[in-house]
Image (cartoon, rainbow, N blue to C red):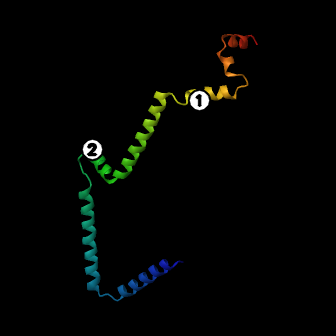
Amino acid sequence: MNHEQRFAKEIVRRLDETTEHLTPEVVNRLAEARLRAVSRMVAHSQSSQPQGRGLLALVAGYALHHQRTLSLAALVAAVLFTFVVTQQLTEHGHGEHGDAFLLASELPPEAYLDQGFYSWLKQQ
């Protein structure tokens, strides 16, 4: 058990000791104060939630609370979209396989340019 846990247990023990000696009047006042605080918290949480305003209000409330996450997601989506469009428009990646094939081949590149080479391949 670490120092923080021991400290927390000591606080709980001392609070329990003091609550044992409270008068019934103080206990009742504390219970009433707790009920008032809980009812205020419930009323506040219900008033901050959109009720009966439809899906648009719900989405707007969600967007306000998660603005950073949505901004980051939009940025990542824009970068990925730009990358895909760039790849499609410039056709990078398609010619690379052909170049690698030519460089790795045992034949010189001029052999592939020769018109009779493909007919010779078909005969073999």
| First of labels 1, 2 by sequence position | 2
Residue furthest to the bottom: 21
- Left or right: residue 65 versus residue 100 is left
Three-letter residue code for mark 1 = Glu
How far from the left and from the top, in percent, is residue 70?
37, 48
Residue 96: mark: 1
Q: Nearer the viewer, residue 45 or 19?
A: 45
Residue 56: mark: 2
- At 27% from the left and 60% from the top, the residue drawn is 45
At mark 2, the secondary structure is helix
Three-letter residue code for mark 2 = Leu
* Res. 43 image quadrant: bottom left
- Left or right: residue 16 versus residue 107 is left
How far from the left and from the top, in percent, is residue 54?
25, 45
Q: Which of 46 and 78 is in front in this view?
A: 78
- At 28% from the left and 77% from the top, the residue drawn is 31
Q: Quadrant of the N terminus?
A: bottom right
Residue 121: mark: none
Q: In which quarter of the image is the C terminus?
A: top right
Instruction: For marks 1 and 2, give the one nearer the viewer.
Output: 1
- Depicted 32 relative to depicted 55: above or below: below
At mark 1, the secondary structure is helix
Q: Mark 1 touching mark 2, by CB under 8 A?
A: no
How far from the left and from the top, in percent, is residue 21?
34, 89
- At 61% from the left and 26% from the top, the residue drawn is 98
- Depicted 56 relative to depicted 103: above or below: below
- Distance (Cα) linking label 1 and label 2: 48 Å
Q: Nearer the viewer, residue 17 or 71?
A: 71
- At 42% from the left and 81% from the top, the residue drawn is 12
* Res. 118 image quadrant: top right
